[in-house]
Amino acid sequence: MEILECVSFILVEDNSFLVERRRLDKPLDPGAVAIPGGHLEDGESPIEALHRELAEELAVTAGRADYVCTLLHRSEEFCKLHYYAVWDWSGDIEKHEAEALLWLRFDEVDRLDLPVDHVAIAEYLRIYQAD
C-alpha cells in the first residue's frame, strides 16, 4: 500500500484557526470542512511543502511555523499528514483552491468534518496552549 505524504497548516490568529470548505470536485474529502494543506512533491521536505502550499492555496508566506504532529488518515488515499502551526504570515489570505475559507474558534473544533483534524487540533492545544 502506497502512503501519500501531505502537509496541513493550522493558521492561528488570536483564539481562532483557518479552515477550508473543500470544493465538491476534489477527489479527496469533497465538501469537507478541514484544515487546509496539500501533497508533498518528489524530493520535497514537509517544511518545503508547507511554504509552497501556503503560497499556492492561500497566497501567503509563512513567518513562524512550528511542527505539531504527524497523523495517518484514510480517505480515497492513505495519507500521512504532517501538521504545522503557522503563527504569522505575510500577504493577504486569498482563496485559490477552496470553496470557502472560515475562521473557527478552538472551542468550535466539532465543526471540522475529518476526525484526523480533531486529533491535530487537540495536539496543538495540548502542546501550545497548555496552562
Image (tube, rainbow, N blue to C red):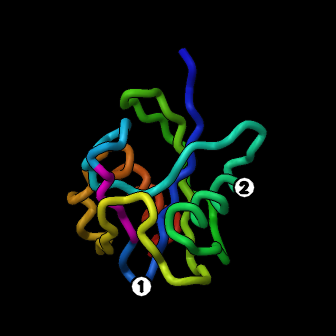
Per the image, the residue denoted by label 2 is 48
Please state which amino acid type lies under the numbered disc 1.
Asp
Q: Position of residue 63 (x, y in %)?
A: 67, 77
Q: Quadrant of residue 35?
A: bottom left
Q: Residues within 10 Å of mark 2 (few under 14, many from 20)?
A: few
The N terminus lies in quadrant: top right
Provide the major secondary structure of the magenta segment.
Answer: strand
Give me the residue at 30% from left, 65% from top: 100
Instruction: Find out whether residue 37 is within the magenta segment.
Output: no
Q: Amino acid at mark 2?
A: Glu
**Mark 2, secondary structure of its residue:** helix
Helix, strand, or loop for circle 1? loop
Please tell me which residue is depicted at 48% across the width and 71% down the height of the picture.
11
- Range of residues picked out in magenta: 18-23
| 118 with respect to 65 (left or right) | left
> As drawn, which residue projects farthest toward the right?
43
- At 48% from the left and 64% from the top, the residue drawn is 10
Of residues 37 and 104, the one nearer the viewer is: 37
Task: Check disc 1 and report the residue beneath it.
Answer: 14
Where does residue 2 sit, x and y in percent of width and height?
57, 20
Quadrant for residue 5, please give it.
top right
